Amino acid sequence: MPDRSFPESEYPSDVHTIHFEEKTILLIGTAHISQESVDLVEKVISQEQPDTVCLELDEKRYKALTQKKKWQSLDLKQIIKKKQLSTLMINLLMASYQKKLGGQLGVQPGAELLHAAKTADEGDIPIELIDRDVRITLRRAWKSTSFFKKGYLISTLFASLFDSTEISEEKLTEMKQKDVLSELMDEMGSVLPDVKRVLIDERDIYLCEKIKATSGKYLVAVVGAGHVEGIKKTFTKDCSSELEEITRIPPVSGVWKALGWSIPLLIIGSIITIGIQKGAGDAGANVLYWILANGIPSAIGGIIAFANPLTVLGAFAAAPITSLTPVIGAGYVAAFIQVMRTPPVVKEFESVGEDMGKLTGWWKNKLLRLFLVFLFTGLGSAIGTYIGGYEIITNLFS
């Protein structure tokens, strides 16, 4: 029978003992790219033989770590239909950032969580996945960020991919003692406080409440080091009433919905008014201008992305229509055609992290090219909406 006293003195400072009601929790703060963390979780779980091991993972991330062929379950057509392509891209960018750092340390991101699950399985110890669904986390972070700060977030992540600077030994040592994602959020916290709140603070609450609800009196919980202090503070409070709110994706505000429909109504109303005031010929000319102003930039975006020819034609045809509805954008239509005509192959799913770090990789890898098609055709349509709308309204009052 193992000793259940959980003496902290036997373990490094990364291990913290928490007493809550009848439970005793051994909270291990890890770095997601540290071999020391991998060794530590194995030692603690093997020695303590807890009732349950809690892991900072959700079902989706757990499957991604444990299933080598996780690409098989990635249905790009469904992702596009549900308008989650931008969320997938942010997820891959963050994963690639961690993988890049992990490569310099010789450890894959999340290795300590995977090893903790393996050690628990070997000891016939049940595991509990205690993290919030990663899709909810990313969508809440995305929706909580303003348009301009979204651009800052994406540009920062892109810059980190192409930064070839070798990390110093001092920096590597520091990273071994800290969760990499938390480090990234700390660096951007002053500029993106809402993102940090969603990715770190809200998850501190979620993780803590899930640990409290886990069955067993003696628990080992493995979490990123950046969550340890937040979890310890949260244990002194009852935050269960907040779970419903922080697992909800905020709806689009009425103001944005109204704004989204106001532009199409303004354009359509202007063309109708031109037709009444100046005749059908002038109205037809403005409709043609709208089609060309939207279709040409969107098609050029597809060409820049090396899209399939049918995708380029689809972008040209879709942009004038999608610009008149906030329900779907030209980028999603073009992306759907692209994935149907030029689907990524297996090796491109497997090499996406490496290809992200090379500029040419974004055009060679069909999965990354799909993101370029989505971005460039959508950007072209947005430019066309501005140009076409300006011309039509000017004609209305001329």
Image: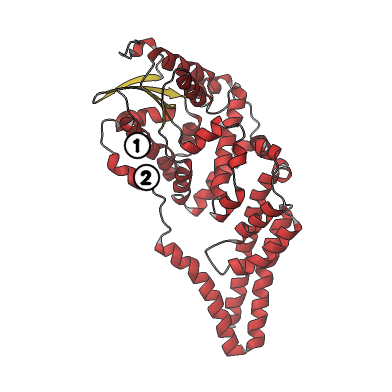
Mark 1 touching mark 2, by CB under 8 A?
Answer: yes
Image quadrant where one finds the N terminus = top left
In this picture, residue 111 sits left or right of residue 241 = right
At label 2, counting other C-alpha atoms closer than 10 Å, the crowd grade (few under 14, some 14-19, many 20 or more) is some
Residue 396 drawn at (x, y percent)? 58, 81
Looking at the rendering, which quadrant does residue 104 occupy? top right
| Inter-mark Cα distance, 1 to 2 | 9 Å
Q: Residue at x 45, y 64 (%)?
A: 257
| Secondary element at tag 1 | helix
For residue 222, side relative to residue 290 (left or right): left
Identify residue for label 2.
246
Instruction: Pick the quarter of the image with the C terminus.
Output: bottom right
- In the image, residue 379 above or below residue 320: above
Determine the residue located farthest toward the front in the rendered image: 124
- Marking on residue 205: 1
First-in-chain label (1 vs 2): 1
Q: Is 151 rendered above or below residue 38?
A: below
Mark 1 residue crowding within 10 angstroms, few (<14) / some (14–19) / many (20+): many
The disc placed on residue 397 is: none
Q: How many marks?
A: 2
Residue that sits furthest to the left in the current view = 21
Please tell me which residue is depicted at 37% across the width and 45% down the height of the picture.
246
Using the rendered view, name the quadrant where residue 228 is placed: top left
Residue at (58, 80) in percent of width and height: 271
Q: Amino acid at mark 2?
A: Ile
Residue 27 image offset from top left, x and y in percent: 37, 23
Left or right: residue 268 versus residue 42 is right
The amino acid beneath tag 1 is Ile
Is residue 259 visible to the viewer in this orientation of the structure?
Answer: yes
Judge whether 4 appears above or below 149 on screen: above
Residue 42 shown left or right of residue 343 in the figure = left
> In terms of depth relative to the viewer, which is nearer, 240 or 160?
240
